[in-house]
């Protein structure tokens, strides 16, 4: 859940060949069955497994909840590794670009909703976190034509806090640890809201800059077209004939209006 799809962090997977020419493999996209994508698929498969383990025997058995925590922890760890591998080795595929953010949000969303169903987590907290994640995803699509919103340090801290808090709530904890997980959850909520507002600010700024750049480019193209037209007319080209024709039409119209005025 880094904000930018892990497998999209690299380029096209192409590496330059000595001599300045690209080999055959350089123009091909990374294989679908690379380690980063496999870890992403494992994370997707862990989502239903985690839910089944969490709700087993009514959802309150400490042993089964420990198994559910293990599945959740593995899913969160694979998120770190597939991102690192994708950035390090340019393991970029269209599948990874789509599946990675889906897997991130699926495991966290499953944990939050399941814990709220069991009564361990207030629904308003689940609502705030899920609304933020959905809103930021839509915001990225809103500005993707102009720029990509980069993952911030605050966003990474938010993800860490959310994962830690959710994992602690999956376990059956009492005493000081139960108090500690509450405060970790509050930190996660605060980071969720603050980083969400920062992403909105960035999105609005990037969109304004993108629209301004588009208007400037359109104005430059119009100016170039006008300069080309004026230059052709000065050389006596087709544009000159068009200008002369337009003058003749105006002169004929003026003569006709004068004749009608005399009548």
Image: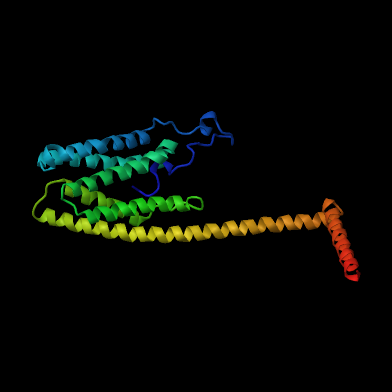
Identity of the residue furthest to the left in this view:
175
Q: Position of residue 126 (x, y in %)?
A: 25, 52
Q: Residue at x 25, y 44 (%)?
A: 110
Q: Position of residue 39 (x, y in %)?
A: 32, 36
Quarter in which the C terminus is drawn: bottom right
Identity of the residue furthest to the bottom in this view:
262
Q: Residue at x 42, y 40 (%)?
A: 97
Can residue 80 be seen in this snapshot?
no
Q: Residue at x 19, y 47 (%)?
A: 117
Q: Nearer the viewer, residue 238 or 39?
A: 238
Q: Position of residue 225 (x, y in %)?
A: 72, 55
Q: In the shown orientation, is residue 36 left or right of residue 190?
A: right
Can residue 95 be seen in this snapshot?
yes
Q: Position of residue 31 (x, y in %)?
A: 43, 31
Q: Nearer the viewer, residue 4 or 260?
A: 260
Taking 110 as reference, is 263 above or below it?
below
Q: In the shown orientation, is residue 239 left or right of residue 69?
A: right
Q: In the shown orientation, is residue 245 left or right of residue 183?
A: right
């Amino acid at each position: 859940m880094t904000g930018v799809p892990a497998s999209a962090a690299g380029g096209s997977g192409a590496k330059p060949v000595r001599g300045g020419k690209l080999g055959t493999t350089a123009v091909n996209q990374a294989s679908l069955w690379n380690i980063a994508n496999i870890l992403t698929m494992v994370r997707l498969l862990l989502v239903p497994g985690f839910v089944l383990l969490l709700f087993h025997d009514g959802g309150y058995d400490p042993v089964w909840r420990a198994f559910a925590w293990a599945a959740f922890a593995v899913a969160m760890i694979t998120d770190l590794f597939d991102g690192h591998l994708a950035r390090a080795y340019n393991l970029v595929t269209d599948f990874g670009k789509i599946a990675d953010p889906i897997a991130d949000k699926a495991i966290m969303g499953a944990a939050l909703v399941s814990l709220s169903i069991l009564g361990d987590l207030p629904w308003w907290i689940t609502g705030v976190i899920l609304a933020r994640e959905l809103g930021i995803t839509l915001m990225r699509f809103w500005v993707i034509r102009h720029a990509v919103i980069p993952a911030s340090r605050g966003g990474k801290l938010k993800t860490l806090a959310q994962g830690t808090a959710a994992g602690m709530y999956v376990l059956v904890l009492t005493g000081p640890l139960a108090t500690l997980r509450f405060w970790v959850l509050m930190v996660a909520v605060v980071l969720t809201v603050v980083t969400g507002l920062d992403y909105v600010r960035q999105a609005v700024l990037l969109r304004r800059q993108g629209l301004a750049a588009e208007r400037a480019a359109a104005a430059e193209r119009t100016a170039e077209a006008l300069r080309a037209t004026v230059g052709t007319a000065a050389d006596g080209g087709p544009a000159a004939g068009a200008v002369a024709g337009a003058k003749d039409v105006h002169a004929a119209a003026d003569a006709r209006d004068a004749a009608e005025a005399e009548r």
